Amino acid sequence: MALARPQVRMLPGSPYPLGATPDGDGTNFAVFSAHAEKIELCLFDATGRREIARHALPECTDEIWHGYLPRVSPGQVYGYRAYGPYQPEQGHRFNHHKLLLDPYAKTIQGSLRWSDAVYGYRIESSRADLSFDRRDSAAFMPKAVVTEDFYHWGRDLPPETPWEKTIIYEAHLRGLTMQAPHIDTETRGTFAALADPRTIDYLVKLGITAIELLPVHAILQDRRLMEKKLRNYWGYNTLSFFAPEPRYLSNGQLNEMRHAIRQLHAAGIEVILDVVYNHTCEESELGPTLSWRGFDNASYYRLQAANARHCVNDTGCGNTLNLSHPRVLQMVTDSLRYWVEKFHVDGFRFDLGVTLGREAHGFDPNSGFFDAVRQDPVLSKVKLISEPWDIGPGGYQVGNHPPGFAEWNGRYRDDVRRFWKGDSGVRPALAARLLASADLFNHRRRKPWASVNFITAHDGFTLADLTAYNEKHNLANHEDNNDGANDNHSCNWGAEGPSEDEGITRTRDKVRRAMMMTLLFSNGTPMLLGGDEFARSQDGNNNAYCQDSEISWFDWSAIESEPGRAMLEFTRRCIAARNEFPTLRQPRFFDGQREIALGMPDASWFDEEGRPMEPGMWNFAEGRMLTLRRVARPEPGGPASATLLLINAYSEDHEFVLPEPRLPWQVLADAAEPTDDAGQPAPRSVQDNRITVAAHAAVLLGVRPIDESARGDGTGAAPAAATQPLEQAAAPSGDEAELLHTQQELPPDGEHGEGNEGNEGADSNAQERAHDGASQDGETS
């Protein structure tokens, strides 16, 4: 292409900050590359179709290429070209024929149009990626836009909800409102829809304190999926770490996202972003050249030591970002600070967090990433949550992250599912999970909130499907039902899928409520999958990563059905009970040794006869009933309160004798949910210190405050009796054992590793597939 001679000379500018920074008179451009020989800035017209000027960046300082261009203002469309060696065997893949997206782009114009021209090699060549492609990719590439960040936040203040009071609601921004009847069609699935007062009012009335959004960074639509007429819905395929996905902005303006966050803050709701810094959308060495690969493949990615031609694939997505490199680590921390400082984000959930903590020797809780974030004056103050696994060596690290980080507790998910499904020998493990998994997290002065408890998440069955399907039903994904997990610890209770049988539906309702009670009445941080509160179904699809459709979108009409409305009201009451009783949200671990009131320690275990659990009782593999009493005094000298959680996973109703001392217990929640003639929850009460717990159900009792005028002996077995039997938990098998055999710090109860259930195959290069390498429920997390 013949370009007009630049009319403006580029000045040296500054190596900091990275990215494009306008100042009113011009714009400074800065980009990192340790091995480039020349970097060119390409300017385009407003449509992004025509290149209007090209400038070589005149300076390189400390491996940062930079220049200042006068009279370039916000709105200017641009890209880069990087010159250097094309030597795949040495890890270098420079190809100046490929237009590159700025790794610090804050706004993106257009989307990628798939073409063989976006690959750095001739895709049909017998030499594969050792060949060199000379076709220009600019016509097919999205471009960066010079962006000026300004928003008047007014009196916006972060809610700063204490961890022990936090209740997380995981949702997909698009799926949350795509079928919301109260939202205009034009704004559904965007931040404008999230900011709608009716959306926020629903979240407030539910009682959650934080919404955790699946990735909202700009994403790349996979070529493989588009050829199947599908879309990458979840978004774990990042194209830019600084720009929001354009489809999520109804008016194309960044301030739409800021307005939504400000409105949520005004309602007391925090915003947590699910972020993907473990890999990029450029796939393996056979993937396209879009940004990082073209700027400096050998620096941005971990490459195999024996053959730098190939990427390390600890993520299951083809590549692994090299956070051991200071400039790559800087990019990640700059991105995190940008979302906190410019968008007032309240926290992050780190996808495949183990990958972020990898050094040359493997996972290290004192890695550069963890150290940098923990000491950062901005990042250390927000909520930090890690997904504690990947598919690399030693990839299962639940409980092994450093202080300051919470972790998705995959063992909680599996143990709770197995217990309510009726598996043998799970009662001891359930006991540990109810008390914030102290066996995993009670070290290095960590707190109970470090355990993010969940039973369902975006990857896997919803809560309704967990009780309605024994098998996955993923044919809509066009992979012959081979994707997703085969073992979900689910139970359909007599029929696969929807059923008209009253006995089956009754059991499903009880089990769903019992699991919801377990989640909300466990110590630790509960995370609720959005839609579970009204029994949202995905028709048995346990891997809906590519379903940007009614399969994944919230069906708000379900709330109008009797089952949906009943489940929603039940969930609200459970959340209200958690908020009311401090025993359910303690900021410190229970140890069973601290006497709180009337001779009762903070936590005690009893059997269904009201007898303290002894070590031998825990060894009964078929035990499926349990009573947990917790007592707390929020302030020294203040009134004490107590809760009693009664659990019955047997298939018959059972009368429970309550432990001494006798207290004026009130029924707070009952998974059996008996109703009166008007369909409202029927009042229940304790009679003669006894109460019946229905089959496959749980009951929560509470008393607040405790009358301490008369003392008594209320001791039960110390928690040691609950944690000791964990050694009897089921051992892993197959792929799970293979993943776990390298783990040196796992407890001995044989928690199965969450191996790459997606198992998409090496030839698919599907970023969304194995990405939840350790997730039990499917594709990516």
Image (cartoon, rainbow, N blue to C red):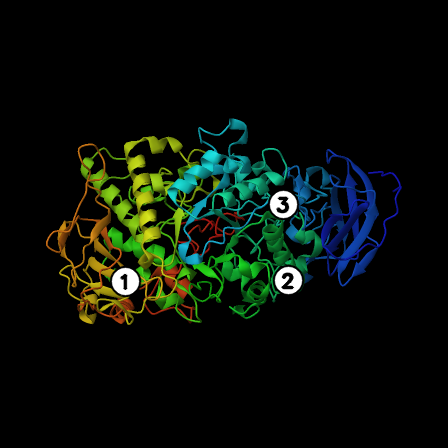
Between 162 and 557, the one lying in front of the other is 162
Which residue is under mark 1? 631
Q: Is residue 189 above or below residue 760?
A: above
Q: Is residue 511 left or right of residue 770?
A: left
* Residue lying furthest front: 709
Give percent across and percent down for residue 297: 67, 57
Identified at 50% across, 40% down, the residue is 173
* Crowdedness near tag 1: few (<14), some (14–19) or many (≥20) residues, C-alpha within 10 Å: many
Quadrant in the rendering for residue 410? bottom left
Residue flagged by tag 3: what amino acid is it?
Ala
* Crowdedness near tag 3: few (<14), some (14–19) or many (≥20) residues, C-alpha within 10 Å: many
Distance from disc 2 to disc 3, alpha carbons, whole Å, reads 30 Å
Distance from disc 2 to disc 1, alpha carbons, whole Å, reads 58 Å
Q: Is residue 614 above or below residue 777?
A: below
Between 223 and 191, the one lying in front of the other is 191
Which residue is under mark 2? 308
Residue flagged by tag 1: what amino acid is it?
Val
* Residue lying furthest left: 688
Residue flagged by tag 2: what amino acid is it?
Ala
Secondary structure beneath label 2: loop
Q: Is residue 630 left or right of residue 262?
A: left
Which of label 2 and label 1 is nearer to you?
A: 1
